[in-house]
Image (cartoon, rainbow, N blue to C red):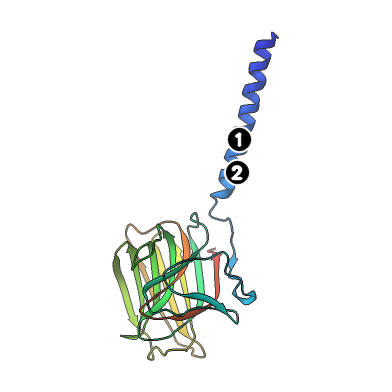
Amino acid sequence: MRPIIRDLVLFLAAALVGSSATAGVLYVLRSPLRGLPFHDSFAVGDDSQWVAYDGNWNVRDGVMVNESNERGAKLITGSPYWTDYALDADISLNSTGDAGVIARVSDAEPGVDAYSGIYGGLRVRDGALVLGVADHGWSEMAAKPMPNPILPNCWYHIRMELRGCHIGLLAQQQGQSEKVSLNLFVPQCPVKGKIGLRSYDSGGQWKNVRVTMLK
């Protein structure tokens, strides 16, 4: 084989290997499985994986606390490539607004409803479990009354399940057996994204935040 042809073959072979390696790295980085299962590190006082958009967020005694009553304070973490998953959290509200979790979050910015994603939370005003979609604007999809008034400084468990555009949301007051759930199909829903904590006109507390793949 002539030297120039040999060098060309070796160059093409190296380029092919390099391209395959790059594709492999991108596949891993963009995998919807990367980083799952996820559990917050609030118990050890670590919030380094989270990014705040408004609010006053601090970890205290294993609990993430937002001391601000700002409208639409958000705290975001996770992978932008997560797709179908379950998001669980224990939450407690401080005042008369609402607070909960957001899923499939993208394009987050400071400001009210300044993100794209799906929100599920508890609203004190009408004592309801609320599900809605934000796309730099708010669209409430469903609300259902809780069996008892939503009390400040009382813990509730929230679970959101996302399978395509089928969204399930469940809430239960700590120490109570009755659960309230919402299940609906959300047309043109966000299909992938990070997770977050969100409050609206209320401070709050969050703990045991975890994300798991759905079976």
Measured as percent of width and height from the top left, residue 193 is found at 46, 58
Residue kind at label 2, given as amino acid type: Val
Name the residue rendered at 53%, 65% in the picture: 50
Q: Are marks 2 and 1 in contact (CB under 8 Å)?
A: no
Residue 204 x/y as whole percent: 45, 81
Q: Is 189 in front, or is 101?
A: 101
Which residue is painted at 43% across and 75% down in the image?
100
The mark found on residue 201 in the picture is none
Is 38 left, or right, of 170 in this rendering?
Answer: right
**Quadrant housing the C terminus:** bottom right
SS at circle 2? helix
Hey, which quadrant is residue 189 in on the image?
bottom left
Residue 123 image offset from top left, x and y in percent:
36, 81
Mark 2–mark 1 Cα distance, whole angstroms, equals 9 Å
Q: How many marks?
A: 2
Provide the secondary structure element on which disc 1 rests: helix
Quadrant housing residue 2: top right
Q: Which residue is mark 2?
A: 25
| Observer-nearest of 4 and 37 | 4
Is 68 above or below relative to 20?
below
Q: Is residue 142 above or below residue 128?
A: above
Q: Residue at x 43, y 85 (%)?
A: 94
Q: Position of residue 190 (x, y in %)?
A: 38, 58
Crowd class of label 1 (few under 14; some 14 to 19; many from 20; radius 10 Å) = few
Q: Which residue is mark 1?
A: 20
Instruction: Tell me which residue sits at (52%, 90%) in the image.
Output: 175
Crowding around mark 2 (Cα neighbors within 10 Å: few <14, some 14 to 19, many 20+) is: few
Apparent side of residue 47 relative to residue 70 in the rendered image (left or right): right
Q: Quadrant of the N terminus?
A: top right
Three-letter amino acid code at the position of disc 1: Ser
